């Protein structure tokens, strides 16, 4: 056996030991006592207790008895919340932005339509970026593709250990597209961009209703491949949400019109000028994914960007899911998934209620993505995605002291921690001028 094979075998044994340890931890009964508990689905519980067993929450409340033999975590003076959800991330799909070989979030397509692209199949469970995100209290993310007119499909991923299958909680949860960047869509103007989308929806309808004729090559030519047309049928029938990334107020209005024309189950992402048409978005019952950390326009489509956009949308009655909007290395980047806490804190600073901000990074995305029966709140029967914070999670100096994902406390040393230890004490010569 070569040294390389021996090293691989050793890593395999170590991984198996970790998984075994994780499984044992998941089977353990844990009682988090005395904390300020935020179930999100109900009022705050002072001096509350959360009991975890076999990866599930089995009891939440004040005066809950601690089971015999349970591991007890004294959370007196601490805050206890569900694990946070980042609703727009490429965590596990993109490792290093400047290295093409580590980027798996975009599909190549001649017609800019990649509806059949299931980006999560390229998710890397061994990504070194997972542990830092989890250490900051993020327990789930929605991973999404990008690029073109129709980007592909996204999945709800839980940051548990193990294989790809272990991580995927639900897939697909949405189809992704964009309106406003005509160049990226392969068109020359906004109106042509919309024309191509209408052409696609008409073709999907024609394909769905004439499959046999299509198989006999007795139909006209369609704007997309058979796989992409198949993937768009659930969108056309309203069974799969269509998340449209768009920013300009007029583009948002055009998106809402398109949704009404075809009966789509729409959601908006970005929506920098959403506050200008908030009442229309609310009337349409369309959720919005947006952030609060940047008021500098990223393009001419977002000249009206402002940091209180999330608060104004919520005040108008829109379901808001907080995501990163800093751009250019912002919270939507895989290495900055953790910034969702700061997005929430900034949203509060700019007028959103604290309760709405917490809901926007926990229960609201869980409901939108159809996984609220598993995560997003602290209730008996839910997966034990639980975080014990040193204080208000939206304060910059607050730390996540205990992070449980499906009942397993993850305390893996991150690459950042290893680098900190390595270079904490430098040789004196390094400091000499």
Image: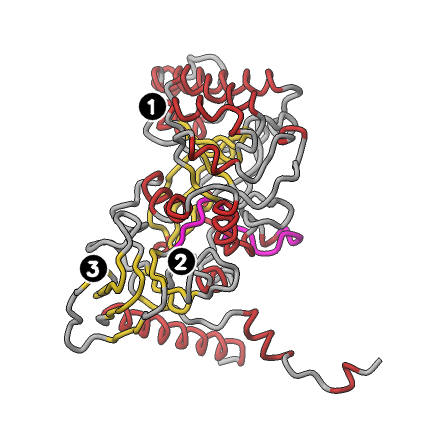
**Magenta span:** 84-100
Identify the residue position indicated by label 2 in the image: 159
The circle on residue 61 is: 3
Q: Secondary structure at mark 1?
A: loop
The circle on residue 237 is: 1
Kindly indicate the quadrant of the structure image that contains residue 378: bottom left
* Residue toward you, 9 or 328: 328
Seen in the picture, residue 80 relative to 254 is either above or below; the reply is below
Q: Is residue 115 visible?
A: no
How many neighbours does mark 1 have within 10 angstroms: few (below 14), some (14-19), or many (20 or more)? some
Nearest to viewer (mark 2 / mark 1): 2
The numbered mark, 3 or 1, whose residue comes first in the sequence reads 3
The numbered mark, 2 or 1, whose residue comes first in the sequence reads 2
Give the CA separation, mark 3 to mark 1.
Answer: 42 Å
Kindly indicate the quadrant of the structure image that contains residue 335: bottom right
Q: Secondary structure at mark 2?
A: loop
* Residue toward you, 168 or 346: 346
Q: Where does the image place residue 219, in percent across and percent down from the top left?
A: 43, 13
Q: Quadrant of the C terminus?
A: bottom right
The numbered mark, 3 or 2, whose residue comes first in the sequence reads 3
Name the side, left or right, on which 213 lies relative to 53. right
């Amino acid at each position: 056996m070569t040294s390389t094979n021996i090293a691989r075998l050793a890593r395999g044994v170590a991984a198996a030991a970790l998984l075994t340890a994780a499984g044992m931890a998941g089977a353990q009964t844990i009682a988090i006592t005395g904390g300020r508990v935020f179930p999100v689905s109900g009022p705050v519980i002072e001096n509350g207790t959360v009991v975890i067993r076999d990866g599930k929450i089995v009891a939440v409340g004040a005066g809950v008895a601690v089971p015999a033999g349970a591991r007890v975590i004294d959370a007196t003076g601490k805050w206890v919340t569900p694990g946070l959800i980042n609703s727009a991330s490429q965590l596990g799909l993109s490792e290093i932005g400047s290295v093409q070989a580590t980027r798996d979030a975009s599909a190549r397509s001649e017609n800019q339509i990649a509806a059949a692209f299931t980006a999560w199949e390229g998710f890397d469970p061994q990504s070194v970026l997972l542990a830092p995100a989890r250490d900051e209290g993020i327990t789930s993310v929605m991973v999404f593709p990008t690029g073109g007119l129709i980007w592909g499909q996204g999945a709800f991923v839980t940051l548990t250990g193990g294989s790809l299958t272990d991580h995927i909680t639900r897939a697909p949860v949405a189809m992704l597209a964009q309106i406003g960047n005509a160049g990226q869509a392969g068109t020359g103007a906004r109106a042509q961009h919309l024309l191509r989308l209408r052409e696609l929806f008409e073709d999907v309808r024609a394909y769905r209703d004439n499959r046999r004729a299509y198989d006999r090559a007795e139909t006209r030519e369609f704007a997309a491949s058979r796989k992409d047309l198949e993937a768009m049928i659930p969108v056309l029938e309203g069974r799969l949400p269509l998340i449209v990334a768009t920013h300009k107020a007029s583009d948002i209005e055009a998106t809402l019109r398109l949704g009404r024309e075809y009966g789509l189950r729409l959601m908006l992402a970005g929506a920098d000028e959403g506050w200008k048409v908030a009442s229309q978005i609310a009337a349409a019952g369309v959720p919005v994914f947006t952030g609060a950390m940047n008021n500098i326009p990223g393009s001419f489509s977002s000249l009206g960007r402002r940091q209180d956009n999330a608060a104004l949308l919520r005040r108008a009655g829109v379901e808001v899911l907080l995501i990163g909007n800093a751009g250019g290395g912002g919270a939507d980047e895989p290495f900055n998934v953790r910034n969702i806490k700061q997005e929430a804190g900034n949203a509060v600073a700019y007028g959103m209620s604290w309760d709405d901000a917490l809901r926007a990074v926990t229960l609201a995305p869980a409901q939108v993505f159809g996984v609220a029966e598993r995560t997003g709140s602290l209730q008996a029967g839910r997966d034990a995605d639980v975080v014990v914070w040193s204080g208000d999670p939206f304060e910059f100096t607050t730390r996540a002291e205990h992070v449980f994902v499906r009942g397993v406390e993850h305390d893996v040393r991150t690459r950042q921690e290893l680098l900190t230890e390595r270079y904490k004490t430098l040789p004196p010569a390094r400091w000499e001028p």
